[in-house]
Image: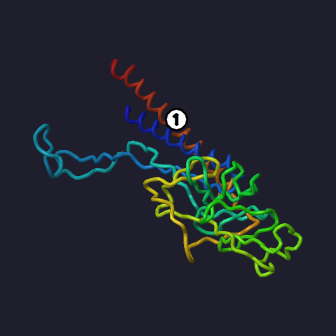
Amino acid sequence: MIRGWYTGASGMAAQQVRLDAISNNLANVDTNGYKRDVAVHKAFAELLLRRMNDDGLYLHPLGSGDMAPIVGKVGTGVETNELFTEFEQGALKATESDFDIALDGKGFLCVMTPNGERYTRNGAFILGKEGYLETKEGYPVMGEHGPIRVQENNFLIDKEGRVWINAKYPENPDRLIGREENAWEEPVLLDTLKIINFETVRYIAKQGSSLWMATEESGPAQIVQGEERPTVIQGFVEAANVNPVTEMVRMIEVNRAYDANQKTIQSEDGLLGKLINEVIRV
């Protein structure tokens, strides 16, 4: 009966972790580039039960039970193994802002923070006071040769992540014929967005503000080259890959599972009380 308490309690603790993850997903349903978390659980070590005095001897303390046939298994609850992040692609939303960038495919944009390089899928950028392309927190977006400095209405980013500027009319945006590269009179390559990925992306760590950092398990960040580079789309942002309806259904499942584990503990407590107060007394 005491084992039943621990089994029920471990189930309640596991469901609490799931509820926290689901709540965080729902809170970030409108956060650009957010990737949903899933709580992964595993069973405790299982106890193998064997019959005694059946095709073998089980004499305590002498003898062995290894020859006795296995009856079955008794589970002893679950525990949280990890919070697993699903990196599946989110929907692309048009913003009509030249400063917004979305990645269609695997990879991350690189930004520079006071703690070093960090990585993001949130491409909702702004033009900083000094002309640098920045996050809303003020972190500059990195190209392969350093921070990217542009002028409003005077740059475009192609699907390869190359940043082009019109050098012939840098102070007269009205002379820009269109956003297409071949419509510019004298496009000049400024830099290329630094797009990176990891050897084991599942082990990168969330840092808040839509930022990620490399860990020892994920391996260092590596610049993505060639056909492995994701498609860069200017004027779009990637929405969170969270389905509110699915998350609400999972929240209901968690509440029911939590309630079932709670009732298990209450039943075990009632049985133990009956054993102590009635059976032992007799």
Density class for disc 1 (Cα within 10 Å; few <14, some 14-19, many ≥20) is some
Q: In which quadrant of the rendered view does residue 76 lie?
A: top left
- Residue at 42%, 33% in the rendered image: 5
Q: Nearer the viewer, residue 257 or 208?
A: 208
Q: x%, y% of residue 99?
A: 75, 61
- Residue at 34%, 18% in the rendered image: 281
Please indicate whether residue 279 sits to the left or right of residue 36 in the image.
left
Q: x%, y% of residue 156?
A: 75, 70
Quadrant showing the C terminus: top left
Please indicate whether residue 1 sits to the left or right of residue 19 in the image.
left
Q: Amino acid at mark 1?
A: Gln
| Colour setting | rainbow
Q: In which quadrant of the rendered view does residue 127 lie?
A: bottom right
136 up-or-down from 94: above or below:
above
The residue that label 1 is drawn on is: 262
- Residue at 51%, 65% in the rendered image: 222
| Residue found farthest to the top | 281
Q: In which quadrant of the rendered view does residue 121 lie?
A: bottom right
Q: Nearer the viewer, residue 181 or 106?
A: 181
Q: x%, y% of residue 106?
A: 58, 67
| Residue found farthest to the left | 62
- Residue at 89%, 70% in the rendered image: 174
Please indicate whether residue 74 sits to the left or right of residue 264 in the image.
left
Q: Secondary structure at mark 1?
A: helix
Q: Nearer the viewer, residue 265 or 186?
A: 186
168 up-or-down from 239: above or below:
below
